[in-house]
Amino acid sequence: MQDINIKNINEYLGKEVRISGWVYNFRSSGKIMFLQIRDGSGFVQAVLEKSSVDERVWNEAEDITLETSLRVYGLVKKHPKKDEYEIEVKDIEIVSISQEYPIGKKEHGPDFLLDHRHLWVRSRRQWAILRIRAGIYRLIEEFLEKNGFTRFDSPIFTPSACEGTTTLFGVDYFDLGQAFLSQSGQLYLEAGIYSLGRVYDFGPVFRAEKSKTRRHLTEFWMMDAEAAFMTHEENIKIQEDLVYYIVSNILDNYTYELSLLERDIKPLEEVKPPFIRMTHKEAVDELRKLGSDIDYMDDLGGDDETILTKQYSKPIFIEKYPKDVKAFYMKEDPEDKRYVLCDDLLAPEGYGEIIGGSQREDDYNKLLERIREHDLPEEDFRWYLDLRKYGSVPHSGFGIGLERVVAWICGLKHVRETIPFPRMIYRKRP
Ligand code: 4AD
Ligand code: MG
């Protein structure tokens, strides 16, 4: 008797195996029982016939409830109608009978499901999303390692803001006053490039976002990448290659998960370089034609991103935003000082921003001026300014939001389903 994972069941046709897992659905006619079993690696149907098992086995099976944990012993067979395998049950061993399971077959509202997130993660859809999330995480790391980036972990407790002071979470930090939870590791990565050349971090970051939108979490996972000597152009190229790497690999290796999510994969198949590229000014021109009242010096709002990305099947780079709507560290566009050398990458089908990147200001005096303009505490940025004193080099980087990418690739309406335990302005439980 071999212990197996359901995902490998095709290797055991005609053999007797043991599967350890949970019953996620079942029905019985009194003579035959169909148990839907999941074991974390996949899903399979186990068929129990009263006439062909011991009375003891049938009697035990009659106690099964939704989410009962058990071990199933049986023969691996081809499903008579579908292109799947199933188990002809010989014996079962109940591990724990589940109490009445709160998540049933009826439709539940999002609040109910989020309150039961600790159980909701067991559902097939959530399983598929969490698998794809883990896959995207791994692919991002794989891509970076292949492209010469070294992991450089940035701190979570920080003395100052990276992405504006309005979305900082403060914490009491012993006798040193307030610390803030990191909004992005970027500034620290900029120190890392002077040691390792190309670096990245990947971890939770925090934003006290007051916005209750489908795109915002207060705790989310970001990968920041930073490279010495990298220009704005090269920065865009590497982002394009990364996104193509993620999408093409997910399409190749996660077909089952995408099918459980009923994701239409046609639009994803169109995600191939070159992506669409436009300047902020061109984006505003187009948006105004589409009926938006956005001004030429305005940031794009969530609705603008939705309208614009619905026009295209490929991701869109929007580059060179007005300086005043972007962060203090971005380098001026040498062709027009009202703009900066930055890019946002917007995912198609209405999804919007998934990446924010830029070339960084590498001149000491210009950076100091920007820090002052933004009213940032100079003392806390001394170390960051130091980087412009000792062998400063042109450099660029970007940050990709994992949950935004998962939502897009899985075709989800809201980022709250893309992370095991979402944190939002109105939710910190379970
Ligand atoms: O555009 P952002 O704010 O860029 C930065 O933080 C830079 N320091 C990154 C860098 O250059 N290293 O954030 C980067 C990405 C966004 O494009 C978006 O995908 C995601 O992080 N993001 C959020 N995801 C979920 N909830 C939120 N509240 C998010 N805010 C940003
Ligand atoms: Mg951004």
Image: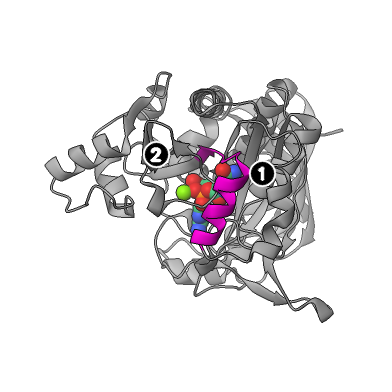
Which residue is under mark 1? 51
- Magenta range is 357-374
- The amino acid beneath tag 2 is Leu
C-alpha distance separating marks 2 and 1:
59 Å
Asked whether 233 falls inside the magenta stretch, the response is no
* Quadrant of the image occupied by residue 311: top left
Is any part of residue 26 visible from this angle? Answer: no
Q: What numbered label is drawn on residue 410?
A: none
| Crowd band around label 1 with a 10 angstrom C-alpha radius: few (<14), some (14–19), many (20+) | few
| SS type, badge 2 | strand
Say whether residue 359 is visible. Answer: yes
Which residue is at the front of the view, 54 or 199? 199
**Mark 2 lies on residue:** 346
Label 2 or label 1, whichever comes before in sequence order: 1
Residue 256: percent from left, percent from top: 53, 32
At horizontal 51% and vertical 38% (from top left) the residue drawn is 358
Q: Mark 1: is the Cβ under 8 angstroms from ligand 1?
A: no
Magenta-drawn stretch contains 362: yes
430 w.r.t. 74: above or below: below
Instruction: Quarter of the image for the C terminus: give it.
Output: bottom right
Rate crowding at label 2 as few (under 14), some (14 to 19) or many (20 or more) other CA atoms within 10 Å. many
Q: Is residue 52 above or below residue 7?
A: below
